[in-house]
Amino acid sequence: MLSVQDIHTYYRDSYILQGVSLEVRPGQVVGLLGRNGAGKTTLARSVMGLTPPRRGRILFKNVDITRAPAHRIARMGIGLVPQGRQVFKSLTVKEHLEVTTRGEGGWTYDRIVELFPNLRERLRSFAGTLSGGEQQMLAAGRALAGNPTLIIMDEPTEGLAPLMVRELGRALRSLKRAGTSVLLIEQQLAFALRHADVIFIMSKGQIVHRCAPAELAADADIKSRYLGV
Ligand SMILES: Nc1ncnc2c1ncn2[C@@H]1O[C@H](COP(=O)(O)OP(=O)(O)OP(=O)(O)O)[C@@H](O)[C@H]1O
Ligand SMILES: [Mg+2]
């Protein structure tokens, strides 16, 4: 589905991703963990075509997307739920979902509000008036409206109350049942361990460890070395 092969990404002179490789298989939830500044968001930006890598290759459904423009990558079926949600404060919930609804079948407007019942009650509210959790659901709903087959969620639980984290977990399980692949970037170890099929750990712009969630749960050394827990 997604194959990131030895990519090297820079912001001007800053050398950030230093040879990153990672795979997401169809229907898989891949957890990507790492401390602040490890390069997780830069990886998401590289895949989406927002900050393309200078070296290496990215394949999506066997098509080379390394230097494709961001709008084309989105149209091919990769959705991004950006870090910090980035909803449009002066658009309503309904407007967010209508503006982006695209493609055939799959995630229709009705199915999206079914997945996130909180949004249904707030359809006419401006996004800026929603709680952090509701904004997160809206950002996820907006990404789904593009009917992605792979969705990249960049720290979706950041700053959410425990009840909202549970809601998000429920939505993630529905996505998985619907066959959507997920690249789940997380700082909340417990959430990643609960939902991911496989875990990659990033440190200083490199993938330093790859394992099953149960293995990581039992590995105090890796957890303290790379995640500070
Ligand atoms: N636009 C930018 N210009 C220059 N450097 C940047 C830019 N964005 C990020 N960086 C740097 O790139 C490195 C990786 O940042 P990145 O945002 O990818 O980390 P992250 O793992 O997502 O961290 P966090 O968990 O805090 O979101 C950091 O050293 C950061 O300071
Ligand atoms: Mg980040």
Image: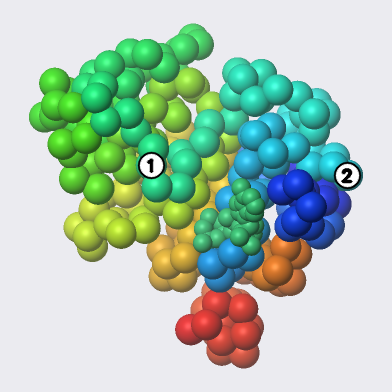
Residue highlighted by disc 2: 55
Identify the disc placed on residue 85: 1
Residue 120 percent across, percent down from the top left: 16, 27
Name which residue lies at 24% across and 25% down: 90
Name which residue lies at 32% across and 49% down: 168
N-terminal of the pair, mark 2 or mark 1, is 2
Name which residue lies at 63% across and 41% down: 45
Q: How many labels does the image show?
A: 2
Residue 176 percent across, percent down from the top left: 47, 42
Asked whether, in this view, residue 15 is left or right of residue 149, the answer is right
Q: Nearer the viewer, residue 108 or 49?
A: 49
Q: Residue furthest bottom?
A: 221
Looking at the image, residue 201 lies above or below residue 48: below
* Marks 2/1: CA–CA distance: 29 Å
Question: Mark 2 packing: few (<14 Cα in 10 Å), some, or many (20+)?
Answer: some
Label 1 SS? loop
